[in-house]
Amino acid sequence: MKILVTGGAGFIGSHLCRLLLSQGHTILVLDDLSTGSYENLDGLEDGRQLRLIVDSINNRDIVDDCVREADCVYHLASAVGVRLIIDQPVRTIESIVGGTEVVLKCCARYRRPFLLTSTSEVYGKGSKVPFCEDDDSVMGATCRRRWSYACAKAMDEFLALAHWVEAKLPVTICRLFNTVGPRQTGQYGMVVPRFVRQALRGEPITVYGDGTQTRCFAHVQDVVNALVKLMECKAAKGRVVNIGNAEEVTIMQLAERVKSLTGSDSPIKLIPYNEAYEDGFEDMLRRVPSLDRAKELIGYQPTHTLDDILHDVIAYEREKKA
C-alpha cells in the first residue's frame, strides 16, 4: 500500500516508517521538522519507497494532496513534551486540534482509514489505577498551561470518534504511555534520554518533584508493531486502545537504574516542579495502563523490559556521543 505518515520524521514516526518499509509498503511522510529531523530518516528517503514533504499539517492543500495519494493515514504529527507545552501553549493547541481537524476532513473526503496517536495525558488527574480506556478524565484548571496538551488531545479523540459515529469513517485511537527508545530527544522534557545523557556526561541527574511519582515505559518497537496491527484490525475501528507497558517504576528508581547501568558517578538532584516548569505545576502520582483491550484485539504483549529499553537508549547515546 501507499501510506501517509504525518510526523513521520519524528521519534515514533521514523520507527513506524522503517517497519512499514520492511513490510513492502511505499511511504509518504508529511512533517514540518519542528520536532522531527532529517537524521531520523537517514538512508530511507529515496523518492521511490519513501518521500518526505516538509510542510505543516495545517496546510490544507498539501494535506489534501497527500491523503488523496494514500491508502491509509497514520496521524502522529503533534506538539510533544511537557517543556514545549509549558513554553509554547498556543503552538501546542493550534498544531494539535487544528492539524488533526485538517487531516480528518481530508480522510473523510477520500474515505481513508485513519489512526490517531493520542496520549495517556488525557486521563488527567484520574486516580483509578490501572487506567482503562472508558474511565472518566479529570482535568486541571484552564489557567494551568500544563493541561492544554491533555485537553487538546482529548478534543482530537472526540473529533475522530465523531467522524466514526456520523459517517463510519474507519478511525482508530491509540493512547500511548511513555514510549521510549533510540533517537528520542530529551529536548522537550522526555525523562529517559535526559537521564541517560546527564549520566554519560557526569552531570547531575535531575529528578523533578520528589521522585515518588511512578511511570511505565514502553519500547518504541513494541509500540509501532501495535500501531500497524491496530490499523489492520477491523474490530478496533471506532475504539480507543491503550498501548504501553504495565511495568511500574518510580522516577527516583529510574534515575538510580540509569546511574547504575551507565556506571556513572553523577549525583541525583531533586528539582522542585516550580523551578523545572512553572508555579502551580501539577503532576500525576501514578500512570499505569490497562492493556486488556489491546491484548483482546491484537494479542498485544510487550516484549521489552525496562532494562531492555535502558540498554538500547544507553547504547544509542554512547554511539552518538562517540
Image (tube, helix red, strand yellow):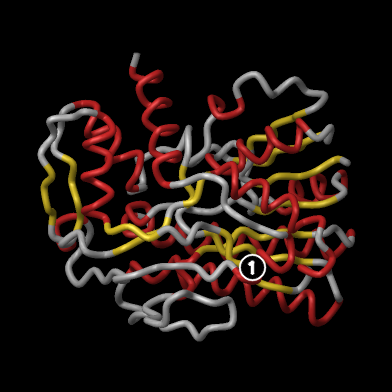
Name the side, left or right, on which 122 lies relative to 5. Answer: left
The residue carrying mark 1 is: 241
Near-viewer residue (114 or 130): 130
Instruction: Answer above or below: position of 104 versus 138.
Output: above
Locate residue 243, reporting x and y percent: 58, 60
Q: Residues within 10 Å of mark 1 (few under 14, many from 20)?
A: many
Locate residue 278, reporting x and y percent: 21, 63
Name the side, left or right, on which 56 lies relative to 61. Answer: left
Quarter of the image with the C terminus is top left
Please, which residue is most extreme toward the top here? 322
Instruction: Answer above or below: position of 273 versus 40.
Output: below
Residue at the image point whose x is 16% and y is 28% from the top: 202
Name the side, left or right, on which 296 lies relative to 85. Answer: right
Residue at the image point whose x is 35% and y is 22% from the top: 318
Instruction: Answer above or below: position of 84 versus 319.
Output: below
Where disc 1 sits, the SS reads strand
Instruction: Answer above or below: position of 196 versus 127.
Output: above
Locate residue 316, reporting x and y percent: 43, 26
